[in-house]
Amino acid sequence: MSPPIAPPGWSRWLVPPAALSVHLSIGQAYAWSVFKPPLESALGLSGTQSALPFQLAIVMLGLSAAFGGTVVERRGPRWAMTVALVCFSSGFLISALGAAAEQYWLIVLGYGFVGGVGLGIGYISPVSTLIKWFPDRPGMATGIAIMGFGGGALIASPWSAQMLESFGSDSSGIALAFLVHGLSYAVFMTLGVLLVRVPRGERPVAGGPSAAQGVQVSARSAVRTPQFWCLWVVLCMNVTAGIGILEKAAPMIKDFFADTSTPVSASAAAGFVALLSAANMAGRIGWSSTSDLIGRKNVYRVYLGVGAVMYALIALFGDSSKPLFVLCALVILSFYGGGFATIPAYLKDLFGAYQVGAIHGRLLTAWSTAGVLGPLIVNWIADRQEEAGRHGSSLYTLSLFIMIGLLAVGFVANELVRPVHARHHVPAQREAADVARQQPESAA
């Protein structure tokens, strides 16, 4: 499948909606918790077991993005989106079969393994294309698409809950809900497959800079540079800090104010989680667009430096003021989303657009690491503090200060980022030959 070349006069503003159709679909992953209680009840699962499909899906996201990134660069966005569509939708269909037959291993295989591959390939599928269409505003372009991943749960969560209410929360009802998800997302993602185009030649924007100008580094060379590993640490620390609050948000706000005169109800805690999701989504487009104005290194200084201050305020004063606690948490989650959306543009600045999708895929292994590290720190410490007889905000004080330390490590790593040495650059002749191979004969 050749990369689809844009015809003359094609508007670059049609590409972000194509990316959004994929990211809004795979963003359903953040709404997996809706299925946890019905699965536990219908199949007799523990909380740990019911979380396994989601955990495996996130692991497969990082692995498939890392190992499939180079193929995505070579085969183009339409191929990648098609693979994502087939895997993500098939994952739901396999899960539907598993629920109907009450075979939980099929749900783990379908949603976790097969669907997880769709998550990873779908996540990186539009990145390189968007950056080539928007060399003047790469942060905004990738922010629009990756905003969809953060906002997908805002659509999927109430939609899934309504289906379970209509179909029933027994195994047959869950199976029917999975079936509807798989078919609906296949249709929606098809819109992106049909709409996506790559720029014609080397000048995607009339009068704009060439996608081939400046520093260009291959994915193989990029992972051998200190810049790549500095950014790996930056992303890992930023995500660890954000996901530490996101994963434990509802019980955390209830514990912080349990001993006060105004405890937080379950419904208010759920509303807090929804607010965090909105901040996560808004941060992806807001902060990534800001990075086009103030620069990538500066915006990560904000994420990591101001983020550490927010954690300190929660640790020291969070239990004395609900508005302060909520405001700080919203800022942290906006940085969490912004970090995801800004990193592709940061990679483009350092390594060029040549194989930025493949480089981005390799960097997402930092997400897989942080997805384990963040919840582990917060939950393990809270469990130990509870065993020691502590309660309320004291359950989280130590983990909050650990997050501050991790953000400080990320801040230092960001300061160490320097331009890539010329020995890693791809020769212009090789890049031109690679670009020519990707253009079909009709585009010549």
Image (cartoon, rainbow, N blue to C red):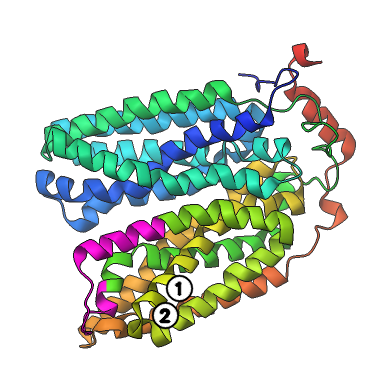
| Residue drawn at (15%, 51%) of the image | 45
The image quadrant of residue 176 is: top left
Confirm or deny contact between disc 1 and disc 2 (CB under 8 A): yes
Picture layout, residue 354 above or below residue 347: above
Work out whether residue 146 or residue 99 is closer to the camera in this orientation and state it.
146
Amino acid residing under circle 2: Ile
Picture layout, residue 291 above or below residue 79: below
The answer, for residue 105, to whether it is visible in the render is yes
Where's residue 320, x and y in %?
A: 34, 85
Amino acid residing under circle 1: Cys
In the rendered view, does 330 fall on the left or right side of 303? Answer: left
| Residue drawn at (51%, 47%) of the image | 147
From the image, tell me which residue sits under label 2.
314
Where's residue 381, x and y in %?
A: 33, 78
Q: Secondary structure at mark 2?
A: helix
Where's residue 252, x and y in %?
A: 30, 72
The image quadrant of residue 295 is: bottom right
Q: CA distance from mark 1 to mark 2?
A: 7 Å
| Residue drawn at (49%, 41%) of the image | 120
The mark that comes first in sequence, 1 or 2, is 2
Q: Secondary structure at mark 1?
A: helix
Main secondary structure along the magenta-highlighted residues: helix
Picture layout, residue 257 above or below residue 170: below
In the rendered view, does 249 fall on the left or right side of 137? Answer: left
State yes or no: residue 263 in magenta.
yes
In the rendered view, does 425 fall on the left or right side of 308? Answer: right
From the image, tell me which residue sits under label 1.
328
User: Where is the N terminus found, in terms of image quarters?
Assistant: top right
Region of the chain picked out in magenta, as a range: 254-277
State yes or no: residue 178 in magenta.
no
Where's residue 324, x and y in %?
A: 41, 77
